[in-house]
Amino acid sequence: MPEHKGWYSRGYLPHYDEPGLIQAITFRLHDSLPVERRDEWINLPTIDASKRRARLQALLDAGWGSCALRDERIARVVEQAFLFYDGKAYRLLAWAVMPNHVHVLIEVMEGHSLASIVRKWKTYTAKQANQILGSQGPFWQSDYYDRYIRNEQHLEQAVLYVHGNPVKAGLVQRAEDWPFSSARWVVAGEDTRAPIDATFHPPWEE
């Protein structure tokens, strides 16, 4: 089973991995911050963490890059990847698949490291997306952002943020109108998700 590492870094972004933690995770498409806009984000590591997150999110919400997740076929694959191992490797709490990035809240289970969960999401969905697009090469940016949830108030704020992101980005007027977000089920007051595709078998085992 993958080892839970506590605090660690892959060379740029710090990560914190412990079983039982609720984590807010963001990862983005490979071209979501294009090189021609480099001057707008290259200095982000020099400012404090909260300002860095806010600035990065504003850049992502501007909709740069191919925005391949606007393709409903690809967005559905990503959503299915989140749903498939709900209750098996983590407890899925909230998510939103945006045009060029995703937000997801999970409670990590014992024996499933955060890094392995994110890697397997990315591996499967990148392969499927490239097949749909008839392309090859990188699909996701290599790293991801994670922030552990401190308490119930923080969790409520995080869920509202995830569900509100499509509204903030100007994509819809109401959170529940975004088709690839858990907000639509929260508002309905029941789990109205479609059954998991029986052919969906992501490569979970090492």
Image: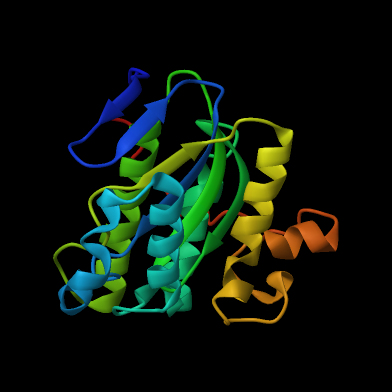
At x 19% / y 71%, what residue is drawn?
Answer: 39
Q: Looking at the image, which residue is at 33% across and 47% down?
A: 144
Q: How is the image coloured?
A: rainbow
Query: 157 or 117: which is nearer to us?
Result: 157
Q: Nearer the viewer, residue 79 or 160?
A: 160
Residue 136 is left or right of residue 125, and the answer is left
Nearest the eye: 76 or 67: 67
Q: Is residue 182 left or right of residue 63?
A: right
Q: Is residue 48 above or below residue 36?
A: above
In the image, residue 121 sits, relative to residue 33, either above or below, namely: above
Q: Quadrant of the C terminus?
A: top left
Q: Is residue 189 above or below residue 131?
A: above
Q: Is residue 113 visible?
A: no
| Residue 19, x across and y down, in percent | 50, 20
Tell me, yes or no, if residue 165 can be seen here: yes
Left-right relation of 156 to 59: right
Q: Position of residue 42 (x, y in %)?
A: 20, 62
Residue 147 position in % (x across, y down): 47, 39
Which residue occupies the foreground of this view, 165 or 90?
165
Give the residue displayed 57% in from the left and 55% down from the top.
95
Quadrant, the N terminus: top left
- Residue 72 relative to residue 179: left or right: left
Q: Residue furthest right?
A: 189
Q: So how many labels did they put on this image?
A: 0
Q: Residue at x 35, y 33 (%)?
A: 15
Q: Position of residue 151 (x, y in %)?
A: 67, 31
